[in-house]
Structures are given as structure tokens and as C-alpha cells.
Image: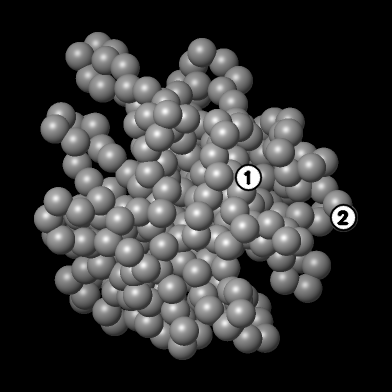
Amino acid sequence: MWEKKGLIFRPDKRYCWMQSHAQLPTADHMRGSVYRIYFASRDSLSRSHIGYIEIDINEPHQILKLSEAPILEPGPPGFFDEHGVYPSSVVTFKDTKYLYYVGWSKGAEYPLFYASIGLAQSEDGGCTFQKCSQAPIVERSEYDPCLVTSPWVFIDGDRWRMYYVSGIRWERLLGRLQSYYHIKYAESADGVHWMRQGRVAIEFKSKRESNIARPSVIKADDKFEMWYSYVEGRPYRIGYATSADGVVWQRRDEEAGIDVSESGFDSEMVCYPFVFVREDKRYLLYNGNAFGREGIGLAVYEE
């Protein structure tokens, strides 16, 4: 079971770009037991920017460093990331950090939106990032007609694997648009150019399910494990799946080991998991109510 440690970070409203939320926590190992956790916060116009905190995972409630300015900002009007950017996955390859991020823009009718996957790189250990292109590296396609978002990327041997959220349709229900998205799989030889064949990794399990979001994958003992968020007639919960080859997955949501609390920041929903391993111990970063409005929570896996 996951033992919750509570909120480890709340948005610091002293900064104009951090007026609410700390969404999609994304950890990157820095040194020893110190981790940098990237997150997205919203300004007064609800535009999301990417910043970070640094913590010692052994004393997670003590913030060692907070970025006073965002490391990645929304793009200009008309660009794919005009209304915000979110972190999703960080990969270090040959002294370069690859930050896979989500760029989004508003649709003509609320809550319609468009999302694509962008790439930023850092050559100075993550101190600064530069967007690799003004365009996304993965965008809508015949396999993903509505949106692509929340990629989880890692290098496995000589190939790069990506699990990402694929928007497949919108439906009008009781006069309001409802999104439907699940998790698909892609591969790459260089981390930039991705091959998609419409392979579904995590599929809907019932007609009541509408959204499956933010995959987080680890490989241990030749087995792949994935955590994700899902909506099935109630706000987000965290699900769990396993795979022998990283392609074909079996959902085991009842084994996720974490649910909402009776009260507090995660009493209504738990979402956007990020799982990582340090010295054989598993850690889970996640968001709670209102998609991370109050900040970032932490849980530790206890046998």
C-alpha cells in the first residue's frame, strides 16, 4: 500500500506566474537523494508555466530550492502552446536533458481544447531550457484526431518508448462537451521523431469511463508497471496496470493501493501520478482536488 505523506508543496502566490495549482509533478534525479520536481502553475489569466522545486527525498517537506521564474513559458498567440505549458517527462541522454512538455490552446467552445507534445532541451543540467521548435514534435493524427498530451518517455535498450494520452472524440452530453481519451504507445530511435501505429496501451474498461490520463511507467525485474488517472462516473482515481513486454497491458486498478482521503487536499480526487524508485523504495508524486489546485502530494510504498 502507498502511505501518504501529505502535501509537500503549495503554490507560492508571491510570484505572478504561480497564483494557483502545481500540476503534473515530474521528478528528475539531481544528486544523491536530491530531486528536482517540475510542475505547472497558473497565472491570474489561467495560463500555465513550468517551474520547479528541489527536495531531499528523505526530508520531502523541506524545500531546498524554488524557481522564482518559470523555466518554460506559454508561446505567442496562435502557437500550439499559446495558453500554457505543462511538464510531463524528463530524460537525460548524453549530457542533454530532454523535457517533454504539453502545450495547449483553447477551443472555440468551453471546455474544448487542443493539446500537443513539445520538446525542450537543456545543456546546463536543467538550469535553463530552450524549446527545440516552435511546433510540436507529436500532434494530432489519424490515430489521435482530437489531441495528444501527457507523454511518459524512457530509453529501453536501443529504443525510446513513449506512452501518451490520445484524444479520440468529443461528445455533447446534456448540452456540454465531454472529452474522451485513453493511452497509446509510440516508439522512436532518437527521442525526437516518433512512430505511431495507433497501438492502444490502456483501453476503456466500461462505457462509463471517459478519460484515462497521465501514464507513469517503471520497468523492474523484466516487468513493466504503469500508474495513470482515470474517470469512471466520478472524479479522477489512480489506476494500475502491468505488462511483460511494455506493449500489451493488463489493467489491475484494484491493486493501485491509493484512493481519496476522508478530508483534505485529496478528498475528492487523486490524479496525475509520477512514480520513481530510489534505493529500492518507491515514491509517488500526485495531485489532488481540482487537478492540483492546492499543490503536490507524496506517497511512499510500504510492503
Q: Nearer the viewer, residue 206 or 72?
A: 72
| Residue 142 relative to residue 227: left or right | left
Q: What's the residue type where badge 2 is placed? A: Asp
Residue at 79% over, 42% down: 245
Q: Which mark is residue 277?
A: none
Q: Position of residue 171 (x, y in %)?
A: 31, 17
Kindly state the secondary structure of the residue where label 1 is placed.
strand
Q: Earlier in the sequence, mark 1 or mark 2?
A: 2
Residue at 19% over, 36% down: 107
Q: Residues within 10 Å of mark 1 (few under 14, many from 20)?
A: many
Q: Position of residue 123 (x, y in %)?
A: 46, 84
All told, the count of numbered labels is: 2
| Residue 183 relative to residue 85: left or right | right
Judging by the rendered image, the residue that carries numbered circle 2 is 221
Judging by the rendered image, the residue that carries numbered circle 1 is 227
Q: Quadrant of the C terminus?
A: bottom right
Residue at 29% over, 82% down: 68
Question: Is residue 76 visible to the viewer in this orientation of the structure?
Answer: yes
| Residue 77 relative to residue 171: left or right | left
Compute the Cα span from label 1 to label 2.
Answer: 17 Å
Q: Are marks 1 and 2 in contact (CB under 8 Å)?
A: no
Kindly state the secondary structure of the residue where label 2 is placed.
loop
Q: Is residue 86 above or below residue 33?
A: above
Residue at 50% over, 69% down: 98
Q: Nearer the viewer, residue 252 or 59?
A: 252
**Quarter of the image where one finds residue 228:** top right
| Residue 155 relative to residue 121: left or right | right
Q: Position of residue 6 (x, y in %)?
A: 53, 60
Q: Position of residue 109 (x, y in %)?
A: 15, 29
Q: What's the residue type where badge 1 is placed? A: Trp
Q: Nearer the viewer, residue 96 or 234?
A: 96
